[in-house]
Image (spheres, grey):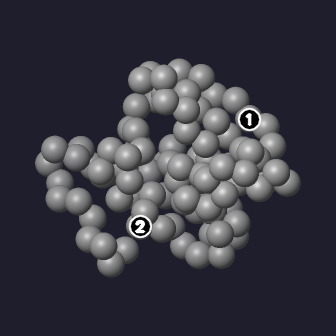
Amino acid sequence: MIERGSALTYAVFSAHHGRGVPADHTNKLWRRALPTEEPVKVWGGMGSGLKCDGCDVPILSSEPEIEVEMPDARTLRFHVACDGLWRVLKQALPDQKHAPPPSSSL
């Protein structure tokens, strides 16, 4: 069953990027390029022009940007929809020790 927040995040992401959930978000989580732990600090503002750590598309100055500081002091930047998708996927993925990585055809 998909929780309302998950379905809403998917719908917002799809509308923002004009496509469904990309394999790159899931693959980045599997490869540990995106962390699965919780951030220690979260803040927001307008886009910096830097690439989103979720989708690799620049966050325009006209778009809101979510920045998260991770326990290892790394700062990640996301579109609002990509931040929501990251949070949903990192909770939804099975234990990485017991499951094969997703296929590249997603």
Q: Which residue is mark 1?
A: 44
> Could you say which is closer to the camera, residue 54 or residue 16?
54
Q: Position of residue 1 (x, y in %)?
A: 44, 58
Quadrant the C terminus occupies: bottom left
Q: Which residue is mark 2?
A: 23
> Could you say which is closer to the camera, residue 6 or residue 39?
39
Q: Residues within 10 Å of mark 2 (few under 14, many from 20)?
A: some
| Left or right: residue 73 compared with residue 47 | left
Q: Position of residue 18 (x, y in %)?
A: 65, 75
Q: Quick check: can you spot residue 22? A: yes
What amino acid is labelled 1 in the image? Gly
What amino acid is labelled 2 in the image? Ala
Q: Position of residue 98 (x, y in %)?
A: 14, 48
Q: Residue at x 66, y 57 (%)?
A: 58
Q: Quick check: can you spot residue 92? A: no
Q: Identify the mark nearer the N-term, 2 or 1.
A: 2
Q: Residue at x 53, y 49 (%)?
A: 53
The correct choice, above or below, for 21 with respect to 72 in the image is: below
Name the outermost residue toward the left: 98
